[in-house]
Image (cartoon, rainbow, N blue to C red):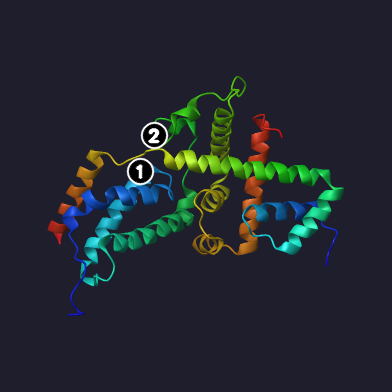
Amino acid sequence: MKINLKCEEAKMICTKSQYGAATWRDKINLNIHFVCCKVCWRFAKQNSKLSEICATIKKTTYSQSIQLTAEDKKKMKMNIECFENKN
Amino acid sequence: MSKEKVNNLSPDLWVDKYADYLFNFTITRVRDVDVVKDLIQETFFAGLKSMSRYEGKASERTWLISILKRKIVDHYRRSNSNKGRAEVRMNFYSEASRQGDWIEESVSQTGSNRPDAHLEAEELGQVLSSCIKKLSKRHKTVFEMKTLQDFETDEICKVLKINPPNFWVILHRARIQLRKCMEDHGFKR
């Protein structure tokens, strides 16, 4: 088992773990790395904060009521009729 | 008796019955309202074309969704093709009048006088959205598909024709750029 992670590797594992894609071995290595590398530790904190913000974006954007207008629907209906008549 | 169709198609009612549902389904995956409208229209056309192949096993809605899903994947595949990549990436401000962009983003981001935590989160969200817009097209597509639209890694790799290690590198770089961009906007913690 490799113990000495390079910072680049550690950061990559941080990203993966944000998506639940890091293995437990990766995570253990990462935590060992954190003990001696505060830079990566800080990076990890910011990285998870970034994920949090993403989650809020997802919520606000997708709960926004963007809807099809009546006009859009009318147009679609007309297009469908045209299409049916052509065939 | 078993040959008889359980479900029947009635294209005249499609728009009334399913347009909103299909729209909501698509808007979470493709964030451009105009593109969404086109995709739905294409779905209806494709549905009409292949009506004869509808076996009546699934409900009308499920059937339309399955067509729509393919259309969405096609859309991403197309935007990842050479032709798609050659498209000029427009400046955010020149697009401000377009539908589907949010008014809040045109407001300057000063980021001081907001003590409320909820507002702060919202504001951070806005900063992040504008940062995402600044990413290169490839980074942006990968990041949005994975983070905001919850696509599976395999799926994204297949659609964008990249291998998983490559995917993670792109995603990682996108995140690093976003972090840098957030820091430039005064996000430090």
Residue B106 image point, x, y percent:
48, 27
Question: The residue under label 1 is which amino acid type?
Answer: Asp
Residue that appears at 74% across and 58% down: A27
Write down the residue under mark 2: B98
Write down the residue under mark 1: B34
Tell which of A22 and B32 is nearer to you: A22
Q: Is residue A14 visible?
A: yes
User: Is the N terminus of chain B in the top left, top right, bottom left or bottom right quadrant?
Assistant: bottom left
Q: Secondary structure at mark 1?
A: helix
Decide: is A43 above or below B4: above
Tell which of B121 and B180 is nearer to you: B121
In the shown orientation, is residue B173 left or right of residue B36?
A: right
Q: Earlier in the sequence, mark 2 or mark 1?
A: 1
Dot 1 alpha-carbon crowd within 10 angstroms: few under 14, some 14 to 19, many 20 or more:
few
Decide: is A2 above or below A78: below
Q: Are marks 2 and 1 in contact (CB under 8 Å)?
A: yes
Residue that appears at 23% across and 51% down: B17
In the shown orientation, is residue B181 left or right of residue B52?
A: right
Residue that appears at 62% across and 47% down: B174
Chain of the residue under the numbered disc 2 shown in the image = B
Q: Secondary structure at mark 2?
A: loop
Chain of the residue under the numbered disc 1 shown in the image = B
Residue that appears at 55% across and 53% down: B146
| Figure label count | 2
